[in-house]
Image: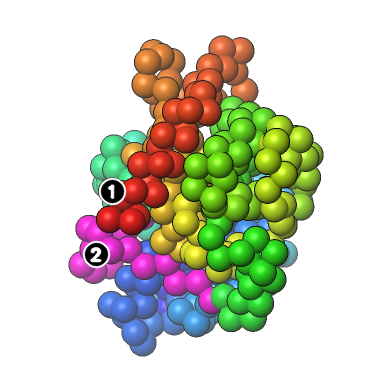
Amino acid sequence: MRILIVKLGAIGDVIHTLPSLAVLRAALPDAEISWVVESRSAEILRGNPLIDNLIEIDTRSIRGTRVDELLPELRRQIKELRGHKFDVALDFQGLLKSAVIAKISGAKRRVGFSRATLREPASRLLLTETVNTDPGTHVIRKNLGLIAGALKIDVPATGFQFPIDTSGHLDEAERIIERAGENFAVLNPAGGWVTKLWPAENYGRLADKIWENYGIVPIVAIGPAETELADRVSAASRSGKTVVTQPGLKGFFELVRRARVYVGGDTGPTHIAVAAGAPIVGIFGPTEWWRNGSTNLDDICVERTDIACRIDCHRRTCNNWICMDIDVDTVFAAVAARLDRAKQ
C-alpha cells in the first residue's frame, strides 16, 4: 500500500501527527509511506526512517485561496507526487490547500476529517471520504482517529510515540549542557501569536526563583528571530544565571529531554518538549491545553479559568488581552509541583 500523509505545518502540528506515523508503520510495515510538508516545518522530519519519501513544498509562494489559483503553482511544486501512484492520501491538515494537494497526488482515496472538525469546510469537496472524530479530544487522538477510520487500524489511547531522528545533533545539546551544567531547566518565552505570550520579563523573574530555590540553571532557548525576547528575559533576571541559546529543532529535542523541567506556552518548542518526555509546565491563554497540550497527566497547565472570554477563543490579536495575566508566583508554584512529581 502506498500512503501519503498530508500535514504541511506548523512545527507543533507536525509533532502532533508523529504518533499517527508511528502507528501506521507498526501496523503496515511493508507500506510505502510518504509525507508532504512545508519546507519551513520539514527539519523535524528529515532523516526519519519511518518515512520513505519526504516531499517538501513552499505554499507561502502561492497567492490566492481559490482552487483555480492554487492548482497551477501546486502542480509545479509537487509534480513528483503522481509518480508514486498513491492508494490513499490522508489529509490531517483540513485546509483547502492540503485537500488540493491530496487531489493532485492522484490518490484513489482521499480521506480527511468530517465537516464539523475541518478548519476550512470547503476542502471537504475535494475528499472522497471523511471520518468523524470527537471535536472535544486532544489533536493527537483526533489524528489517530483519522487513520483508525480510514484504514481500520487499532490505535493506542495512551503511550504515544514520537519518532524523530536526532542523529548528528547530540553534540549540539552537549555543548549547551557544558555551559549550563547537568542541573538545568529550559524556558521558552516565544509563541507564534502575540496572544500566546507570557511576558518575557516574567520569565526572567521565574528564572531567578528557579535558581534561588532549587539551584537549577535556567536555560532560555529561542529561535532565530527571538533574540529580543531573550534580551528582555535576561534584563529582568537579577541572578545573572540565565544561559541563552539558539539550538536547532533536533538539538533542542536532545537538550530538553535532559531538563529538570520545561516552561513555555502553546508553541512548537513546547510540543517538541512533550515529544521528548520532558516534565512540562505549560502557560496557555487563547488555546486549550486539553486539545494542544501534553497528554502526560503529570504535566501541569497554568491558565486563567476566571474569565468568560477564555474558552477556546483562538484569537491572534485581542483588545481585551487578559488571559496571560498570570503572576510569576503562580507559575513558580506549578514548577515546584512538577519538580516534585518528577522526583516521586
Decide whether residue 163 is among the magenta residues: yes
Q: Is residue 222 above or below residue 25?
A: above
Q: Quadrant of the N terminus?
A: bottom left
Q: Quadrant of the C terminus?
A: bottom left
Q: Is residue 344 left or right of residue 264?
A: left
Amino acid type, label 2: Val
Q: Which sits earlier in the primary sequence, circle 1 or circle 2?
A: 2
Image x and y of residue 46, in percent: 60, 74
- Image quadrant assignment for residue 143: bottom left
| Residue at (33% x, 56% y) in the render | 343
| Residue at (73% x, 40% y) in the render | 234
Q: Is residue 60 above or below residue 80?
A: above
Q: Which mark is residue 297?
A: 1
Q: Is residue 140 above or below residue 201?
A: below
| Residue at (57% x, 45% y) in the render | 211
Amino acid type, label 1: Leu
Q: Real-space Cα distance between discs 1 and 2?
A: 19 Å
From where the camera sits, is residue 200 visible?
no
| Residue at (25% x, 59% y) in the render | 158
The magenta region covers: 142-165
Please tell me how crowded label 2 is: few (under 14), some (14-19), or many (20+) other residues with Cα within 10 Å: some
Decide whether residue 66 is among the magenta residues: no
Image x and y of residue 91, in percent: 45, 56
Q: Which mark is residue 155?
A: 2
Image x and y of residue 2, in percent: 42, 78
Q: How is the image coloured?
A: rainbow
Which one is closest to the eye, mark 1 or mark 2? Answer: 1
Numbered disc 2: secondary structure: loop
